[in-house]
Image: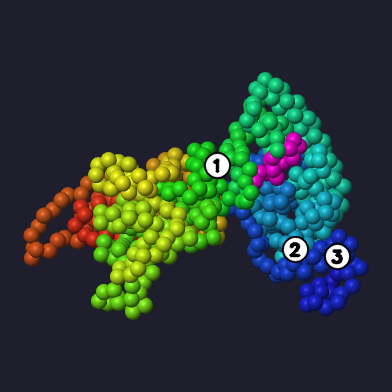
Amino acid sequence: MNQQQWQNFLAGKQQPLQTLTPEIAASWEFCRKAAVDPFMIKPHRIVTSSNLQVRQQQNRDLIKLIKQEIEKFSNRLQLRSPLMILTDNQGIILWRSGQENARLAANRIYFREGTSWTELDVGTNAIGIALRTKQAVSVDLAEHYAAASRHWSCAATPILDEQQQILGILDVSTFENSSAVEAGLLLELIAQSVANRFWQEYLEQQRDLLQYALQHPNQTDLLCDTRYRIVQVPPVLAEQFIVGQEMQQCLRPNQLYQAQKIILHEKIIGHQVRIAVPQQTSKSFYYPGINSQNLQYQEFLTQVIRAARSWLPIHIYGESGTGKEIIAKTIHYNSPAAAGPLIAVNCGAISENLLESELFGYAPGAFTGASAKGHQGKLEQANGGTLFLDEIDSMPRKMQTALLRVLEEKQVTPVNGHPQKLNFRLISASNQSLPALAAAGKFRTDLFYRIYVAPLKIPPLRQRSSDMQQLLEKFCQEQQWRPTWEKKILTVAHQYSWPGNIREFNNFLQRIQLYYPNQEPTIAQLQQLLDTLDAAISKPVTQIAVKCQRRRLPLTAAQIATCLQKNHYHISHTAAELKISRTTLYRKMKQFGLR
């Protein structure tokens, strides 16, 4: 098909496609119906470097075998400057090999590691068609749908496992010099050789796994092969998991698990998998956070799941920045009150004078300056749903008494108003130990016993450092930022204790993106960004008392940071020590970037 016919086809004009093979003609129609942009410069999907590393690690045996087979058959590949490509079973390029001129030409169209080379992402191409049809195919020059690929000639063949499922796609491509079509038979030979070796290794792994199962009987854990296909199921999980199926297909939405590698003769032969939440659920579980691989955090989420399904008052304890708001949302949207509203109140961010009207509301004309329509308080707004009281340890004593009365009587009386019946789920949170505050007389014990029924303690980030890679990956995806030096970021991150937890970690990543959007920083430069707050906290502050027209010296970032650290980020206590209001403290923290 010539250039004019291609342009007419893109313009929607009726064009005979007899000059194209049936599979390529079908692909062109598929791309047009899917609104694939034929003039795209950059493909739609490029995974992050950390995601690519995970995929390469998962397919390390496939990559190793492909390299060996290509080297064995290289003298039979009669092409000038060929580019060899291997993708995973989703079309993500895992590995490529070729001369520099071919690699440079491929780089111009992002034909490189980490790019998704499916029909939806880059239009008609050999890899995409082979992935969709499970058949060997070649696409030559103008047979490509996208303009960027029409200088390339490509041949691809799928590599299938013992169950005829795609392990990956092997491709050879040439640029403006010779046709890759003639290499198709050789590719199929290489793919079949790799598949045979995989089958042999699979049989050996199955034998070793069954021998392991006999030597290590287990009544609670799954036994899976290296690709997480189930080999053995304990009786307690027999209703959910089936031998021979992939574990992911049997898992329920957001079901948690912990996998342990089984190693024999320094080689991974499978996984022993502990299912953290084996009980059946009638609906999926909503959780807006990352899919944590940390067992301690998974066990914490198991507690959250169980607590959410009850009407019991829940208290969340966690250091600043651990994500108490996320846990509160998780509880609400998985609770019997999910159909109602989620009303959040930060007790430390509202002055004592305003907190009463904010919580209880007021009737029309209740006081001078009051709205003529009155104001519905947060307690009444939460009726039928969930009330989330954050920083409840900052709640003034007077308001603690009033809240206790509401919880006991299940009704609220707005200022100058009439009693209103209430029914809501209560979630409270603090970054200080509420039992310790109650024992010290700093929090009403009767209210404590009302709200501290189902306590949940969020593990700090330093205890779940294995999740940092996923947090980094999530940040990169949200910001559409792909640094190639993520390992360096994680190296620095793992050496720090993160007193500000996930919030501080995200602040750190934002600083990196701000100062080094494309340039790779050194370890020292990353540590300098990390120490921005840490240095302020650790720096000694000299207390200076100077009388000058009875005015205080302005508070510095270091003074505020030190006081926050001393008081464990308790806003009320910090504000009292600094002799400023909570509102002023919040403003100063925002000004200095301390929160």
Q: Image check: 525 left or right of 247?
A: left
Give the dominant element type of the magenta stretch: helix, strand or loop. Answer: loop
Q: Give me the residue at 9% from left, 57% from top.
A: 546
Q: Type of residue at label 3?
A: Ala
Query: Where residue 440 sits: x, y (%)?
Result: 25, 42
Cα distance, mark 2 to mark 1? 36 Å
The residue where tag 3 is placed is 25
Query: Where residue 188 sits: x, y (%)?
Result: 85, 45
Quarter of the C terminus within the rendering? bottom left
Q: Which residues are magenta?
A: 240-252
Label disc, if present, on residue 498 of the rendered structure = none
For disc 3, the neighbor class at 10 Å (few under 14, some 14 to 19, many from 20) is some
**Looking at the image, is 267 positioned above or below residue 62?**
above
**Looking at the image, is 29 positioned above or below residue 330?**
below
Q: Secondary structure at mark 2?
A: loop
Query: Where residue 235 sits: x, y (%)?
Result: 68, 31
For disc 2, the neighbor class at 10 Å (few under 14, some 14 to 19, many from 20) is many
User: What is the basis of the colouring in this image?
Assistant: rainbow
The residue where tag 2 is placed is 123
Q: Give me the residue at 86% from left, 69% from top.
A: 1
The residue where tag 1 is placed is 293
Query: Where residue 126 sits: x, y (%)?
Result: 79, 56
Closest to the observer: 164 or 407? 407
Magenta-drawn stretch contains 52: no
Q: Type of residue at label 2?
A: Gly
**Is residue 320 visible in this depiction of the protein?**
no
Q: Give me the residue at 36% from left, 65% from top.
A: 419
Q: Type of residue at label 1?
A: Gln
Closest to the observer: 205 or 247? 247
